[in-house]
Image (spheres, rainbow, N blue to C red):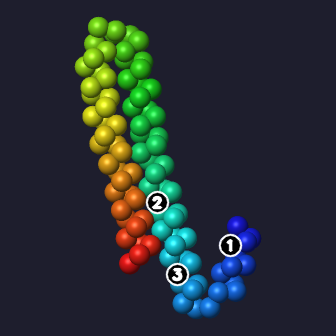
């Protein structure tokens, strides 16, 4: 973090704004990726638990799990799009 502070101090005003925008965009994407990561972990864990309890329903649980993963991963992709918009806007 100290190296980042040194770079920001040595940059001129326009460069400093670009550095701050890039750092903000990176932080925003990092925070946006935390939620879907937790969500997918929770979803897969509960799905494995459900398949272990009722093996005969494993096919239906697996299909539902993959749909849930797709919808949860869409949140991470939305966060990535926002990151790109903040970085290049």
In the rendered view, tell whether residue 60 sits above or below residue 37.
above
The quadrant where residue 15 appears: bottom right
Gap between marks 3 and 2, in whole Å? 16 Å
Gap between marks 1 and 2, in whole Å? 18 Å
Gap between marks 3 and 1, in whole Å? 13 Å
In the rendered view, tell whether residue 11 sits above or below residue 77.
below
Decide which of 89, 49 is in the foreground and name it: 89
User: Could you tell me if the residues under marks 1 and 2 are in contact, i.e. CB atoms within 8 Å?
Assistant: no
Label 1, residues with CA under 10 Å away: few <14, some 14-19, many ≥20: few
Label 3, residues with CA under 10 Å away: few <14, some 14-19, many ≥20: some
Residue at point 37%, 65% (across, down): 82
In the rendered view, tell whether residue 55 sits above or below residue 14.
above
Q: Which residue is mark 1?
A: 4
User: Could you tell me if the residues under marks 3 and 2 are in contact, i.e. CB atoms within 8 Å?
Assistant: no
Label 2, residues with CA under 10 Å away: few <14, some 14-19, many ≥20: many
- Image location of residue 8, percent across then percent down: 65, 81
Mark 1 or mark 2: whose residue is earlier in sequence = 1
Instruction: Report helix, strand or loop for mark 1.
Output: helix
The quadrant where residue 14 appears: bottom right
Residue 18 shows which numbered tag? 3
Residue at point 39%, 58% (across, down): 79
- Image location of residue 87, percent across then percent down: 44, 73
Residue at point 38%, 78% (across, down): 89
Instruction: Report helix, strand or loop for mark 3.
Output: helix
- Image location of residue 30, percent across then percent down: 51, 57
- Image location of residue 64, percent across then percent down: 27, 28
Q: Which residue is mark 2?
A: 29
Q: Give the left or right position of residue 23, taking residue 69 as reference.
A: right
């Amino acid at each position: 973090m100290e190296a980042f502070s040194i770079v920001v101090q040595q940059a001129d005003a326009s460069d400093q704004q670009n550095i701050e925008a890039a750092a903000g965009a990176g932080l925003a994407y990092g925070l946006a990726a935390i939620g879907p990561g937790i969500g997918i972990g929770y979803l897969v864990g509960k799905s494995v638990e459900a398949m272990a309890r009722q093996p005969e329903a494993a096919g239906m649980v697996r299909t539902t799990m993959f749909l849930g993963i797709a919808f949860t991963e869409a949140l991470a992709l939305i966060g990535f799009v926002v990151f790109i918009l903040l970085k290049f806007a």
